[in-house]
Image (cartoon, rainbow, N blue to C red):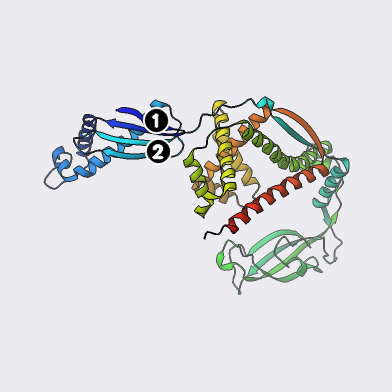
Amino acid sequence: MKVQIKSKKDLQTILSIIVDKQEIKKKLDARLVELQSQVDIKGFRKGKVPPMVIKNQFGKAIYGEVVDKILKESTTKAIQDKKFKVAGQPKINLKTFGEGKDLNFELELDLLPEIKLQSFSKYKISDYSIKVDKKELDSRLANLTKEYKNFEDRQEGSKAELGNQIIFDYKATVQGKDFDGSKGNGVAIELGKDLFLKDFDKQLIGAKTNDIKKVKAVLPPNHPKKELANKEAIFECKIKNIKQSKESKLNDDFAKKLGAQDLSDLTKKVNDQISSQYTMALNSITKKEILDQLDKSHTFEIPKNLLDNEIKFNSKDATLNQDKNTIIETKKRIKLGLILNECGEVNNIKVTEDEIKNEIQKQVKSMPGQEKFVFEYYQKNPAATQHLQSSIYEEKVIKFIKSKANLTKKELSIKDAEKMITSFNENNKAKATRQDKKKKNNPSK
């Protein structure tokens, strides 16, 4: 195989490649022999069909298959030998081909730019943390005692009131018929929270222990049995017990019930929880600081095909190719992606299978009751897993850059953090609104 650079302009390169006809013949003959054991032709025993007979019947198709394989292999080898980093799919232009001839073709390549990473030590980055004041912390802890109540038996003969816990067994029917899940024992609900079914609680107000109450309620629209969705059901409820709430005391025993070692450990966990609620948003501000400085400190050309493909992918209207601001934003997005990728490669940053699994597990925990759906979604959608991997990769690279930058630690009160986050979100929203208006005002339909 002979490879020559025919032309080179900016990031676009054209290679001229010639594959010798003898090399093609060898591969063609090898394929004909390989097909002997596979082809079944009338008049010949399977595996005994002469190669020339196969060639006479299927010659054009076999030649096309062999040439297609040679094109792929020679393209890959030419790129590897030249040590090119290619942006997007190469374009192949056939010049001469045919049995008994050399295969001559041109390979049009868009190359990735050479990126010289600048020192990150000069970057000035804000590293935010949250100072949780005692008033906020005490308020959160007090709310926990209200949320996780203790309940004790009410006096016999007492009627159930809002805020009481009522324990009951039930049998339910739809149009007089039982259904899957139509029975329940020892169900406990707090009257007034409406967590069982809409308007279910209020029909049990005034009930007493050992009463049998009939309750009408509409089954939810997302009921597992589609035929039961939004259907009215009648629940026959046998009241087993009625309890009244008793305020929990904020002490070590209460903390242990919530999984903490003691009250001090619970206080720390709540403090960390409050802090993390804000630091996630503040990390987005820090990330923008990093990305802005990456953009300013690096200059290189963007491959034209990457720009064209990105604009087409993000726009239904091809005329947006002419929108200056769209092109600027798209170029910046591609540029940052290339810089982050280069940084990851140079510093051998990789994403492990365990990191992907852990991230999926986090999503599972945040969606109780939907665990199976989340797992199946990633199993059936490789693109979703790839997107997740890319997100983890980007965050790891950002974290690496942050570790090398000149950090200024800033401790914020919750009030100041809320102001900063609100301002950041409003700026992003205003920017998105301006872009939407430009799209709507575009006269081309």
Residue at 86% in and 42% down: 251
In the displayed structure, 195 sits above or below 266; it is below
Q: Amino acid at mark 2?
A: Pro
Q: Position of residue 433 (x, y in %)?
A: 66, 54
Q: Position of residue 55 (x, y in %)?
A: 17, 41
Count the marks: how many? 2
Callout 1–callout 2 Cβ contact below 8 Å: yes
Q: Amino acid at mark 1?
A: Ile
Q: Nearer the viewer, residue 221 or 93?
A: 93
Query: Badge 1 is on which residue?
Result: 79
Few, some or many C-alpha atoms within 10 Å of disc 1 (few <14, some 14-19, many ≥20)? some
Residue at 83% in and 36% down: 264
Few, some or many C-alpha atoms within 10 Å of disc 2 (few <14, some 14-19, many ≥20)? some
Residue at 69% in and 26% down: 122
In the displayed structure, 349 sits above or below 356; it is above
Residue at 49% in and 45% down: 308
Q: Is residue 147 left or right of residue 236?
A: right
In the displayed structure, 68 sits above or below 239; it is above
Query: Badge 2 is on which residue?
Result: 90
Q: Based on the displayed image, in which of its 4 quarters is residue 194 positioned? A: bottom right
Q: Nearer the viewer, residue 408 or 208?
A: 408
In the displayed structure, 121 sits above or below 390; it is above
| Image mark for residue 19 | none
- Give the distance between the C-alpha atoms of the residues marked 1 and 2, in whole angstroms: 10 Å
Q: Based on the displayed image, in which of its 4 quarters is residue 116 positioned? A: top right
Q: Is residue 36 left or right of residue 136?
A: left
